[in-house]
Image: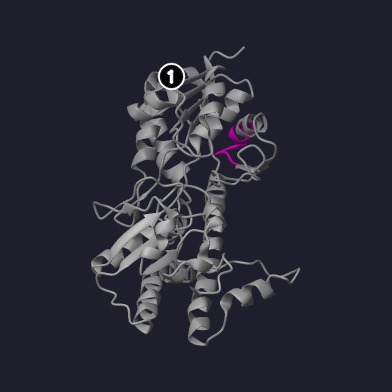
Amino acid sequence: MSKFKYNLAVIGLGYVGLPLAIEAANCKLKVAGYDTNESVVNNLNKSVSHVEDISDKVLQDALSKDFLITSNSNILGDSEFIVISVPTPLTDYQPDLSYVEEATKSIADNLKKGQIIVLESTTYPGTTLEIVKPILEQNSNLVAGEDFLLGYSPERIDPGNKEWTFKNTPKIVSGINEKSLKKISEFYNSIINEVVEVSGTREAEMVKLIENTYRQVNIAMVNELAILSNMLNIDIWEVVDAAKTKPFGFQSFRPGPGVGGHCIPIDPKYLSFKTRQIGQPVRFVELAQEINNSMPNYVVSRISELMNKKEILFKNSKILILGVAYKKDIGDTRESPAIHIIESLLNKSVEVSFYDPFVDELIVNNKSISKELVVENISDYDIVIIHTPHTAFNKIDFENIKSLIFDTTGSFSISNVERL
């Protein structure tokens, strides 16, 4: 019988931590969810979810089981397994591990022999051994790998993905020694369909970075080809669709207005940060970042050219952005290219509005952007930019819209459209 009150404590109840906590509770584990944000804790305890993939009903069902949500860090000492799933943003373009450090200190203040700590937050290789382990040992006077166990497991959450969920997405696990790896692997095997073990925490940390750097680089390649194809009067969308008919040796990536979300714009910069520490910049990756970061300005330049051809004055024009989320059929605007496009348009004295069925409010440069509530009003704008290919937009009768239309997604069959 375990000497701990809870099987699992999850630190950070965001898009990674909350699904983990709920899945564990659904697997009949005793779970404590810990978050320092009192508002988040209060709303979750009222069965109000702030994570799109977790409905209020799913949350309510989990709370009816052995699932506690609290802002009291004392529960960390009562839990056998503790998973850290806090944000790791960029601050001034540098990796910000302050949330990880604070979470680790909270664990260390309550750490007991026999506990198992797992870091899930995305970070650069070496974080578990160089940041987390020393804090835990120094603050607790316990020895990692002996008194308590420690490992890393990268999160693989894809918001809005109905096919690949937390439960059926293979889980990478690692430990600082064999004993740690065995216990961490056993834990995740109890709640996830498939667990994949790797030899060390640095390898596991690198897995997450390589997955999203792969996407960053391939998106950058097709974005650069989209720019060149436009100059050569070639339809890049037809080219990509034709190329993907090859059944081997090619994976299709599509052009777009840039990259957004919590992973692709951020993770490669963690890799770049680490490699520069050893004096070896990842030039290929950094070039890809540069290309993708330039795409919002390219979109603005294309619509400016299009309006000039139609003799529409760019300054003081009215422009509508269709979709401001970073991906289809969700409301997440983190790092969305739409933000950068709107910033550029505002700087050029353009009147900008947006329409997005998943986003109620948008603030850019401390300015609230007006939301268009009626689809029928689209023709009142000088130009409409399709930024996010939400399924709901399939119902819009684009053919009868009088405005110019610029589609950055290539997702709609419209005769009177200009595409990226």
Q: Nearer the viewer, residue 34 or 407?
A: 407
Question: Residue, x 41% and y 69% (percent of image)?
Answer: 403
Q: Is the residue 125 above or below the residue 184 in the image? A: below
Residue 297, percent across and down?
36, 71
Left or right: residue 319 versus residue 386 is left
Q: Is the residue 271 above or below the residue 288 in the image? A: above
Give amino acid for label 1: Ile
Identify the magenta region.
173-182
Q: Is the residue 277 above or below the residue 65 in the image? A: below
Q: Which residue is mark 1?
A: 75
Left or right: residue 152 versus residue 350 is right
- Could you say whether the residue bearing mark 1 is in a helix, strand or loop? helix
Question: Residue, x 48% and y 86% (percent of image)?
Answer: 231
- Colour mode of the rendering: one colour
Question: Residue, x 39% and y 19% (percent of image)?
Answer: 74
Q: Callout 1 environment at 10 Å: few (<14), some (14 to 19), or many (20+)?
A: many
Q: Is residue 265 magenta?
A: no
In the picture as drawn, the residue positioned furthest to the bottom comes out as: 232
Residue 154, percent across and down?
54, 44
Question: Residue, x 52% and y 14% (percent of image)?
Answer: 5
Q: Could you tell me if residue 268 is visible in this image?
A: yes
Q: Nearer the viewer, residue 113 or 11?
A: 11
